[in-house]
Amino acid sequence: MMIKTVSQYLGFILGIIYGLVFRLISDVEYLDGYYNVYSITFIWIIPTLIGLFPIMFSSSKLYLSPLKLVLYPIITICLFLITTLVTGLEDFFCLLIIGIPFFIAAGVVGILLGAYMKDKINNKRIYSIFLLPLILNPAENLIPNKSEEFKVEHSIIINKNRADIFPNLLEVQTINEKQYGNGFFQIIGIPQPINSKMYNDGENSYRIGYFTDNFKLYESIDQSIENEFVSFQIHLDKSHLRNQPTDIHLVKSDYFKFGKISYKLIEVDTNKTKVILSCDYLLNSKMNFYANFWAEKIISDFEKRLLKSIKINIES
């Protein structure tokens, strides 16, 4: 009875193990650049193959139903993602990024490949398909990434003059949770700003932006025109990042690079100023269109909430 039960769910187990092996390989330091989490192979090919396991390795009755041909690959992907979360290999934000293409790939497997693959199970050569990532990922790295610059910009009207506002952009007053709000990205673990302070080391002035989870950004002033404009350059090598998958695989990676964060002040009236906050960043990958979808959403959410909080603090 136990053997029969194991046989029935063997595909799920093998699929999870298969995915974990390649996920762990991506963390091997000397393989960095050959096998990585945010490659086309890992994002699309690995979930496709994970989804094949319950079709090819479980009992034949498991995939007699067309519904199961779609459902079981998706269940296997879901179990794999939960396992990476529980083991600390991924956090909620990483799961959000890879989860969407993973589930799409799994669904496609069931709809398009399920019926075809089950008829090929007796052909032992078909199992060599699970070695594809060992070939495709190194081959993928022969194709150079595409580097693109992006900008996200938002503005707000603050009922104060520029002279009153400008110092509060250099040193942002403490922002409480009620001011900033608790949205979707905050729920899944994106740090929210607390305040920022200016310092001087005797030679240069710099700013540290303090965030929740002990996340700190070191910023140097790139350009400043009093009461009109100021821009900051972020230095990740001097910043204090979290030891979490999001920071390790994204913030510290070569795929995403912060450019400048700048504020521009435009006088609307004597005691009314338009404050424009913009963030420049660089994406360097083979999937910039997908990466920018998330980068734009997160930075846009951050800018809107930060500007609203600054307005509340300055006007109150």
Image (spheres, helix red, strand yellow):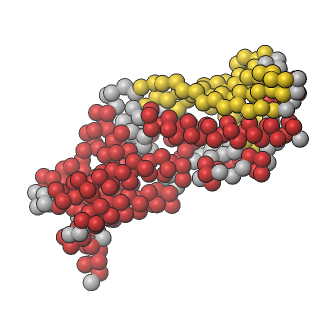
Q: Which quadrant is home to the C terminus?
A: top right
Q: Is residue 93 visible?
A: yes
Task: Please give left or right for residue 284 compared with residue 314 in the image.
Answer: left
Q: Is residue 187 above or below residue 134?
A: below
| Residue 21 spot, x, y in % from top left | 36, 52
Q: Which quadrant is home to the N terminus?
A: bottom left
- Residue 6 occupies which quadrant of the picture? bottom left
Q: Is residue 59 visible?
A: no
Task: Please give left or right for residue 24 compared with residue 281 in the image.
Answer: left
Q: Is residue 281 above or below residue 316?
A: above
| Residue 267 spot, x, y in % from top left | 81, 21
Q: Residue, x 44% and y 34% (percent of image)?
A: 289
Task: Please give left or right for residue 124 compared with residue 54 in the image.
Answer: left
Q: Is residue 105 above or below residue 312?
A: below
How many numbered tags mark residues here? 0
Q: Residue, x 85% and y 32% (percent of image)?
A: 159
Seen from the viewer's position, the closer of residues 36 and 118 is 118
Task: Please give left or right for residue 120 compared with residue 228 in the image.
Answer: left
Q: Residue, x 55% and y 44% (percent of image)?
A: 246
Which residue of the protein is positioned furthest toward the front in this rendering? 269
- Residue 195 occupies which quadrant of the picture? top right
| Residue 268 spot, x, y in % from top left | 80, 23
Q: Residue, x 88% and y 23% (percent of image)?
A: 270
Seen from the viewer's position, the closer of residues 187 and 89 is 187
- Residue 38 occupies which quadrant of the picture? top left
| Residue 249 spot, x, y in % from top left | 51, 41
Which residue of the protein is positioned furthest toward the left in this rendering? 123
